Amino acid sequence: MIPTEKIEAQYYKYRFHFVCFPEHLYFLHGYINGNDIYINKNDSIEMQSLTMLHEVVHAEVDAGCDLTDHRPVKTIRSEGFANRISRRDVKRYLA
């Protein structure tokens, strides 16, 4: 079982969609909309796994706020928290 399949099995209440993002969004690795999580299928398996966990943390912890504007302190804290948790947990799936 590849890491992304393990994460999908673990977090079965979310629907993961692997899509190609447009060129002007090349920097974007993932996006969440309710229980639908969109992952850039052009990324490596490691980056896809990390992004999946990152977006799951947002889904479970954030209160449904829009985090696309990276200037507010609230967004910076949310992104930092999601980054720390996803980097810690991804090791379990990549091993």
Image (cartoon, rainbow, N blue to C red):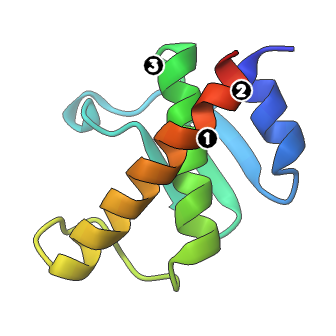
Q: Is residue 40 visible?
A: no
Q: Could you tell me how far apart the alpha carbons at marks 2 and 1 are, in whole angstroms?
A: 8 Å
| Residue underneath mark 2 | 93
Question: Looking at the picture, which amino acid does disc 1 mark?
Answer: Asp
SS under mark 2: helix
Is residue 38 or residue 8 the one in the foreground? 8
19 with respect to 4 (left or right): left
SS under mark 1: helix
Q: Is residue 38 above or below residue 92?
A: below
Q: If the image is split into quadrants, where does the N terminus sit? A: top right
* Residue 51 rendering spot, x and y as whole percentages: 50, 39
The reply to whether discs 2 and 1 touch (Cβ–Cβ < 8 Å) is: yes
The reply to whether discs 2 and 3 touch (Cβ–Cβ < 8 Å) is: no
* Residue 23 rendering spot, x and y as whole percentages: 25, 27
Tell me what residue is drawn at x 32 percent, y 59 percent: 80
| Residue underneath mark 1 | 89
Of all residues, the one furthest to the left in this rendering is 71
SS under mark 3: loop
| Residue underneath mark 3 | 43
* Viewer-side label of 3, 1: 1
Choose the circle earlier in sequence order: 2 or 3: 3
Q: If the image is split into quadrants, where does the C terminus sit? A: top right
Is residue 19 or residue 45 the one in the foreground? 45
1 with respect to 15 (left or right): right
Q: Is residue 55 above or below residue 10?
A: below
* Residue 63 rendering spot, x and y as whole percentages: 52, 86
Within 10 Å of disc 3 (Cα), the crowding (few <14, some 14-19, many 20+) is some
Question: Looking at the picture, which amino acid does disc 2 mark?
Answer: Tyr
Q: Could you tell me how far apart the alpha carbons at marks 3 and 1 are, in whole angstroms?
A: 19 Å
